[in-house]
Image (cartoon, helix red, strand yellow):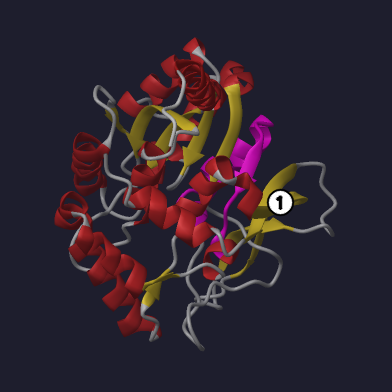
Amino acid sequence: MPEPSRRSSSVWDETVIKGLLVITLAAKVVWLDVDPAVLRGGHEPDDGLALLQSFHSPELEVRGVSVVFGNSALEQGYPNGQEIVKRFGPKGLEVYNGAASRAELGVENDATRSLAAALRREKLTILALGPVTNVATVLKNHPELTSRIEEIIAVAGRRPGQTFVIGEGGRPLMDMNFEYDSEGFQILLDSGAPIVLAPFEISAKTPISQRDIERFARVPELADFFLEPLRDYVNWYDTHFQVRAIYPFDTLAVAYLTSPQWIDCDTLPVQIQTQPDDIQPSKNKPYLIVSSELETERRVTYCHTASDAFVPDLMRRLLDVR
């Protein structure tokens, strides 16, 4: 076989460089506001997976990470977030401590001050993967920064009459991120910032199997941190719902940015409504409802279905340790 000419090699190198430049130039600048719980005992580790997915996605440039209460108390979530970023994130990436409860809505903290400062420097897309208290505080206290937000992607919302049930005949689950701070979500809606919802509906259609979870065992640096919490989470699903799989929740919010061709979404009217509690029917509670039937001008992007390509792509990104 003839040796490639320097000219052909040079053209190939130039093509690769241009391709890398396109990826770099096209990268979305994002801020992740998370409630991580990569912990033993059946905690919900999807924020940790979403962080790992983001760090391994050339389509994204992560500017900052802030932590909010949610899947775990802040005193657990903040050091957990720090450890994830230390082990797997880009060098120099900061993690900021945020709200410990919805009672702190409107109260400035390291997370809100840092996010506001970052928005003054440049426009950002915000992945709000837990209760939205930190993000809502920024919008409440600094409404002039709304125009600096490209999109807010949140993991919340439902259609009318929809219940969150895993498996066959299980007890309905709450729309946790929304219900933990519905007042904060109303601030997001009132701000006019573009909002994308990656709700329970899309995750319920896209489970991650135990077989895929076990693939973490092949990568020692990932297995050391993620594998046992993920196994515990699978066991928790099995105990409570008789399902040996997990729903990937927050990773679908990230996929909306990295792989939009595989995420089907609709633009729909949205409204917060008070209705009977689907878990405790004797009470009422707020619901974040999307429907073409709503008579409201406020619209959101509601993502409802992921293609079969999502899970293989997610696993490729998660396991891509360099």
Stretch of the chain drawn in magenta: 176-200
Q: Residue at x 31, y 42 (%)?
A: 100
Q: Residue at x 62, y 46 (%)?
A: 260
Is residue 140 among the parts visible in the rendering?
Answer: no
Locate residue 146, reporting x and y percent. Answer: 61, 23
| Residue closer to the observer: 225 or 125 | 225
Q: Residue at x 18, y 40 (%)?
A: 83
| Residue closer to the observer: 170 or 304 | 304
212 on left or right of 127 = left
186 on left or right of 203 = right
Locate residue 259, reporting x and y percent. Answer: 57, 46
93 on left or right of 140 = left
Q: Is residue 129 above or below residue 168?
A: above
Q: Secondary structure at mark 1?
A: strand
Locate residue 159, reporting x and y percent. Answer: 69, 64
Q: Is residue 282 above or below residue 99?
A: below
**Name of the residue lying farthest toward the front:** 1
Q: Is residue 190 magenta?
A: yes
Is residue 34 among the parts visible in the rendering?
Answer: yes
Give the quarter of the figure containing the C terminus: top left
Q: Is residue 282 above or below residue 194?
A: below
Q: Is residue 55 magenta?
A: no
> What secondary structure characterizes most of the magenta part?
helix
Residue 67 placement: quadrant: top left
Residue 22 placement: quadrant: top right
| Residue closer to the observer: 302 or 277 | 302
Name the kind of residue labelled 1 in the image: Gln
Q: Quick one: label 1, few (<14), some, or many (20+) residues within 10 Å?
A: many
Say which residue label 1 marks: 271
Q: Is residue 55 above or below residue 162?
A: above
Give the quarter of the figure containing the N terminus: top left
